[in-house]
Amino acid sequence: MDNKEEHIVALKVMRLTRPTLYSNPVVSCDPRDLPGTTLSAAPDVTRLPHLPHLQLGEMLLLPQSFGSIYLGETFSCYLSVHNHSTGAAACELTVRAELQTGSQRLTLTPTAGADRPASLAPAASRDHLIQHEVKDTGAHILVCAINYTTEAGVNMFFRKFFKFEVLKPLDVKTKLYNGESDEVCLEAQIQNVTPSAICMETVTLEPSPLFDAVDLNTSAEGDGSVFGASGWLGPQDSRQYLFCLRPRPELRLASAKQLKGVTNMGKLDITWRTNLGERGRLQTSQLQRMAPTYGDLRLTIEDIPSVVALDQTFTFTCRVHNASDRTLALALRLETPSAGLVWRGVSGRPLGRLAAGASATVPLTLTARRLGLQPVTGVRLLDAALNRPYDYDNLAQVFVAAPAPAERQPETAAC
């Protein structure tokens, strides 16, 4: 409870932050104009020494209040406790700081010794620093409490409140796509919603323990980012980041059912800096995907060339996985694919019995007959016990290119 006696201790609080750029209006005049030499009569640090009639366009401005802070930045504050009396000491003085948000109260620890009772002599001061990484948006209230005892033995107490807003610096939208080969693609759109430009330092994906993350945001040569050397992201600008999550090799075959039930794919870790070097860091919550729905039988592509030449015959490998709880007797049929690709091999051949949870590799051969992007279609697996067919279309796509000039056959002259 506050005492009605006059306090001999004063508290000053200042947020520690970098200055901002202040746009000073450019004012110029000609000596023949009415102002004459008015603008250059008094010394002004905002003017260039050799251009007295022209002022600088931008200056550094120190913060005048707590202002706003962005989520992920570090809130730093300077506390100064001063005994302004001339002859009385403040005994057993303690300083406590608390940060109140919409959902919780956090006790901030000042520099060592701030919460320990100590005596403050007349005209003396005690300075402390507090720092806290902001993790919630919305209104925040900093509560600073001072307790001390006068030389007459009177307990004195007072508090000061400082309110500031925590704003969202980035808008992050994510999409997850399940692939046929247990791969998961992540598309992350990051938009700068601050009124000034920021410099994106890193955007990384921390995958779940069952997956490895592949960053797809580097150039084909591997010598830098696809966004160029500059990491600047202007106000309201957006960037698309792509990642691929691949199952770890030791888990891909042995733990197919375990991979099927995994929904937590990992977290995005984003770091940036403001135009004056203030650092910020955000980490998203666990990214969730829709669990894929597999049938009794799965067919995935193990390896396939992405580009083949016209009239070239190529072989690729498929993996057949029995996801059911019974043994399957399978046969392979090759239906007529699109006109661009032609199957080579025996259709209707048996693949043997495949135990529950087991996998087997099947090599297949095609010949390219048409230029352009061609789909791989027409694979059918037949369960002999139930006479149930499993059709697989659009397994992959292959680009058929024209052969190099050296590979073309010489034209035969007409008789």
Image (cartoon, rainbow, N blue to C red):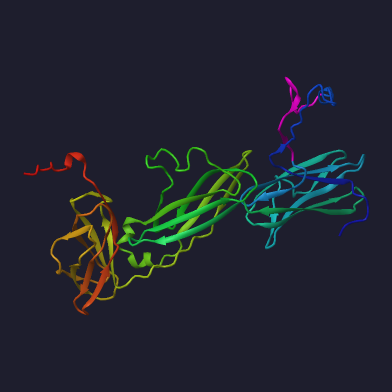
The residue positioned farthest toward the bottom in the image shown: 386
Instruction: Name the residue at 73% across, 37% down.
Output: 61
Quadrant in which residue 255 is drawn:
bottom left
State which quarter of the image contains the N terminus.
bottom right
Question: Which range is magenta?
Answer: 43-62
Q: Is residue 51 magenta?
A: yes
The residue positioned farthest toward the top in the image shown: 50
Horizontally, residue 3 falls left or right of residue 54, namely right
Q: Is residue 173 above or below residue 40?
A: below
The spot of residue 68 in percent (x, y) is 70, 49
Q: Is residue 332 above or below residue 83?
A: below
Instruction: Name the residue at 88% across, 43% down.
Output: 89
> Which residue is at the front of the view, 397 or 175?
397
Horizontally, residue 295 falls left or right of residue 367, namely right
Q: Is residue 60 above or below residue 165?
A: above
> Which residue is at the front of the view, 14 or 37?
37
The spot of residue 55 in percent (x, y) is 74, 28
Q: Is residue 56 above or below residue 353?
A: above
> Which residue is at the front of the view, 392 or 122?
392
> Which residue is at the front of the view, 29 or 351?
29
The spot of residue 78 in percent (x, y) is 74, 43
State which quarter of the image contains the C terminus.
top left
